[in-house]
Amino acid sequence: MGRFLAIDFGEKRIGLAVTDYMQVIATKLTTVSTIDIFPFLKDYLSREEVDGFVVGNPKQMDNTPSESAKAVNLFVDALAKTFPDIDIYMVDERFTSKIASQTIAKSGLKKKKRQDKGLIDSVSAVLILQDFMKMNLKK
């Protein structure tokens, strides 16, 4: 059994989170510059078994695609072409950045660290992965 890897796509940075091999716990992995994501993923997949990618699907309150949906869809297409043997799952990512910011604020970290956008992106990826796990990995 492999891991699931969550992706919180952004035009500048991508937050990443992974499950453990038992697919029970989601933890933040890192944040990667968007231009470096494919080399990073190729390297990561050379060392780790991944059963699927979980990508945040940006939607508006009325459930229509948000402004960033086009860029996410282009990324998902490239992801599917680059890694054709790995399933891709889309998960609604509404409010993940806000919830991530609130969670980080409550964590006791110093203000400068709480404002680190990379940390917010990777915690957002954890939230996306947790939502996926609740919906799809009930054992």
Image (spheres, helix red, strand yellow):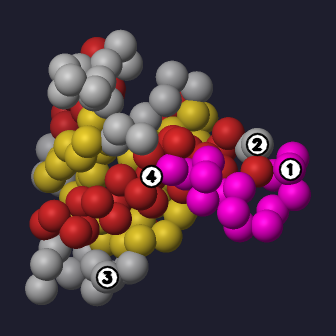
Q: Amino acid at mark 2?
A: Gln
Residue at mark 2 to residue at mark 3: CA–CA distance: 29 Å
Q: Amino acid at mark 4?
A: Ala
Q: Residue at x 51, y 22 (%)?
A: 11
Q: Which residue is mark 3?
A: 24
Q: Residue at x 61, y 52 (%)?
A: 102
Whichever of labels 4 and 3 marks the residue nearer the N terminus, that label is 3
Q: Magenta region, mostly helix, strand or loop?
A: helix
Whichever of labels 3 and 1 marks the residue nearer the N terminus, that label is 3
Closest to the observer: 70 or 110? 110
- Whether 99 is drawn above or below 65: the answer is below
Q: Are marks 1 and 2 in contact (CB under 8 Å)?
A: yes
Mark linked to residue 125: 4
Residue at mark 4 to residue at mark 3: CA–CA distance: 15 Å
Q: Which residues are magenta?
A: 99-113
Q: Residue at x 41, y 66 (%)?
A: 18
Residue at mark 3 to residue at mark 1: CA–CA distance: 31 Å
Q: Amino acid at mark 1?
A: Lys
Residue at mark 2 to residue at mark 4: CA–CA distance: 16 Å
Q: Residue at x 28, y 79 (%)?
A: 23
Mark in front: 2 vs 3: 2
Q: Are marks 4 and 3 in contact (CB under 8 Å)?
A: no
Q: Which residue is mark 2?
A: 115
Instruction: Tell me where residue 82 sits by quadrant.
Output: top left
Q: Which residue is mark 1?
A: 111
